[in-house]
Amino acid sequence: MYTPNLGNEGYGWVVGSLMGRRTVDKAGGIEGFSTYILRFPDDGITVIVLSNVRDAPAGPISRQLAQVVLGAAVSREHCGDGF
């Protein structure tokens, strides 16, 4: 499921890295909500952002939360207007 077969995408999951750590992530949403799951499988860390605002920046918010958990500096500038 997490093995890239089309570029950096496995079976519905994007395989990548953040802060030098392996990640798999999945975005979702439809009218009325936005979601993002960011996993660090080697570290046993999962960040899930659920919003009832469709245009909420769930991906950037999840990456910032991961930075907090992993002890990195965080900036609000990438969070989006109004969030």
Image (cartoon, rainbow, N blue to C red):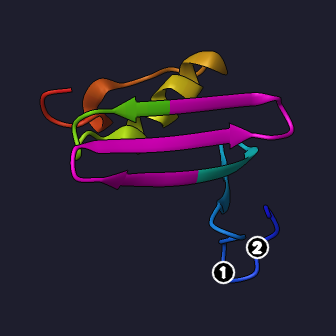
Q: CA distance from mark 1 to mark 2?
A: 6 Å
In which quadrant of the rendered image does the N terminus lie?
A: bottom right
Say whether residue 48 is left or right of residue 17.
left
Query: In the shown orientation, is residue 13 left or right of residue 21?
Result: left
Nearer to me, 37 or 18: 37
Q: x and y percent of residue 34 in the render?
A: 34, 44
Does the magenta run of residues contain 83? Answer: no
**Magenta span dominant secondary structure:** strand
Residue position for label 2: 4
Q: Is 22 situated left or right of 13 in this image?
A: right
Q: Residue furthest bottom?
A: 6
Residue 2, quarter of the rendered image: bottom right
Residue 19 shows in this picture: no
Residue 13, position in %: x, y?
65, 61
Badge 1 element: loop
Q: Residues within 10 Å of mark 1 (few under 14, many from 20)?
A: few
Quadrant containing the C terminus in the rendered view: top left
Q: Give the labeled residue for mark 1.
A: 7
| Place of residue 9 in the rendered image (x, y in percent of width and height, measured from the top left) | 65, 71
**Looking at numbered disc 2 in the image, what kind of residue is underneath it?**
Pro
Q: Which residues are magenta?
A: 26-48
CB atoms of marks 1 and 2 within 8 Å: yes
In front: 41, or 53?
53
Q: Going 58% across and 27% down the picture, which residue do you hit?
A: 66
- Crowding near pointer 2: few (<14 within 10 Å), some, many (20+)? some
Q: Residue at x 14, y 34 (%)?
A: 81
User: Which residue: 86% across, 38% down?
Assistant: 42
Query: Which residue type does callout 1 highlight?
Result: Gly
